[in-house]
Image (cartoon, grey):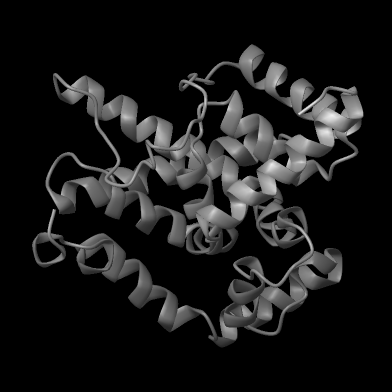
Amino acid sequence: MPVSQVSWAGDTEVIRRLDSEWAEISDSPKLCQRLRQWAEDDSRLDFETGTDLLAASQSREVSSWSERDQVLSALLDRYEDDPMARRIALQVVLPQIKSLINRVRGWDTEERAARVVAAAVDVLAHCAAEPARTTPNFRVFANTRRRVLRAAIRDRSEPLRFSADFSHVPDSAPVEVGGRDERRQLDELIDWVRDKGGLHEDTARLVVLTRAGGVSIGELAKSRRVDPQTMRRQRLRAEQRLRRGLSIGP
């Protein structure tokens, strides 16, 4: 679709309202006071302003995505009891929400934006109620994406597609990983790949999710805001280390 014909997420009413609301509260005295209160109990939320918190929660200058996601994890710990924590958590994952709105085909743009935001709110609540070892930013992205796709399938005769799916990448055939048993099996496989290859957990997760979990390199790179080619090279090096760990020839 030509760029001139695309209505981007930032143009939708729901996203404009969220961004406008955040601009009003991000450095407000009320939020700054709440952050001081939170910091007394949790150093992960030790920020002077909402702007500082958001920058840290979305930073790419970190040693691992798990380190960056400590901010979102701390917000999810307060999610059920604190409306302010719920609002900030939504703002933290807003880049992923915008990405899904821009990349999904289906419904008109306003309805699509509303559906994606609603799905993300539900997923955040679920992640807060049922913690998992998966980094929360990716967990929110993957599960929101899955819910949107399923909703589209119910509403349309043909499946929804992503406008940039990197289908030329020779990944495994997609596998729907929605149940508790499937998630547990993936977590166990990640642990095995990490141990056998001597890999960092984030790297092992990259290999498993893109080879066995039904996630494409393009999708994962978009959610983490990195170049897909960089991620492919990272996966190649990881798989080479795994082969050496298993004493398997190239």
Query: 113 above or below 38?
Result: above
User: Relative to residue 17, is residue 105 drawn left or right?
Assistant: left
Task: Kindly tell me whether residue 134 is visible in this rendering.
Answer: no
In screen coordinates, is 231 left or right of 189? left
**In this orientation, which residue lies closer to the viewer: 249 or 35?**
249
Q: Position of residue 43 (x, y in %)?
A: 84, 68
> Going 16% across and 61% down the picture, which residue do you hit?
7
Relative to 8, residue 221 above or below: above
In this orientation, which residue lies closer to the viewer: 161 or 245?
Answer: 245
Q: Is residue 139 visible?
A: yes
Q: From the viewer's perspective, is 228 left or right of 153?
A: right
Q: Residue at x 70, y 52 (%)?
A: 73
Question: To which quarter of the image does residue 39 belong?
Answer: bottom right
Q: Residue at x 36, y 41 (%)?
A: 165
Residue 189, percent from left and from top: 76, 22
Q: Nearer the viewer, residue 25 or 91?
A: 91
Quadrant in which residue 83 is drawn: bottom right
The outermost residue toward the front is: 250
Q: Is residue 83 above or below residue 152?
A: below
Looking at the picture, does residue 223 appear above or below residue 134? below
Give how far across and how far down residue 95 sits, in percent.
Answer: 45, 61
